[in-house]
């Protein structure tokens, strides 16, 4: 059964935590951090979401973002997940989850 959609109000900052699947590592090399930041930057521009602060740790990410519309954050996280996981999975490593 899918989870209920999250509601994000436009112009209200949100703290987002994205964890590795089963809380395992999601960054395996220093270059992985750069790949994630690049994917995040592209998605933020595409969906008009402002990023105020971020912390990338080996097994999770903290993001402080403000969307311009109610779907902005969801769209950003979907794009980042697809882009980053597609690159990482070519090396046979686990996927991300947003528990």
Image (tube, rainbow, N blue to C red):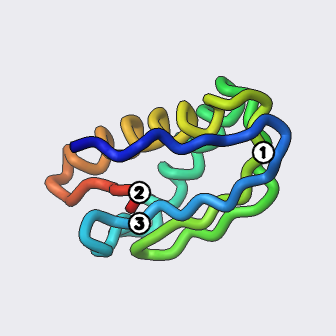
Mark 1 — residue? 66
Regarding mark 3 in the picture, which secondary structure is present there? strand
- Asked if the residue at tag 1 contacts the one at tag 2, i.e. Cβ–Cβ closer than 8 Å, the answer is no
Q: Residue at x 46, y 70 (%)?
A: 60
Quarter of the picture holding the C terminus: bottom left
Regarding mark 2 in the picture, which secondary structure is present there? loop
Mark 3 — residue? 19
Mark 2 — residue? 98
Circle 3: is it few (<14), some (14-19), or many (20+) Cα within 10 Å? many
- Horizontal side of 19 relative to 22 (left or right) equals right
Of the image marks 2 and 1, the number of the one nearer the N terminus: 1
Q: Residue at x 60, y 33 (%)?
A: 43
How far apart marks 1 and 3 lie (CA) works out to 20 Å
How far apart marks 3 and 2 lie (CA) works out to 6 Å
- Horizontal side of 79 relative to 73 (left or right) equals left
Q: Position of residue 52 (x, y in %)?
A: 81, 56
- Please tell me which residue lies in front, 23 or 37: 23
Of the image marks 3 and 2, the number of the one nearer the N terminus: 3
Picture quadrant where residue 41 is located:
top right
- Asked if the residue at tag 2 contacts the one at tag 3, i.e. Cβ–Cβ closer than 8 Å, the answer is yes
Quarter of the picture holding the N terminus: top left
Picture quadrant where residue 86 is located:
top left
In this view, which residue lies farthest toward the right? Answer: 11
């Amino acid at each position: 059964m899918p989870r209920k959609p999250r509601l994000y109000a436009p112009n209200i900052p949100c703290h987002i935590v994205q964890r590795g699947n089963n809380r395992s590592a999601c960054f395996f090399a220093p270059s992985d951090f750069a790949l994630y930041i690049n994917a995040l930057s592209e998605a933020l521009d595409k969906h008009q979401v402002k990023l105020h602060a971020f912390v990338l740790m080996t097994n999770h990410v903290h993001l402080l973002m403000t969307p311009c519309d109610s779907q902005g954050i969801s769209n950003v996280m979907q794009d980042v997940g697809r882009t980053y996981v597609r690159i990482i999975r070519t090396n046979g490593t686990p996927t991300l989850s947003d528990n």
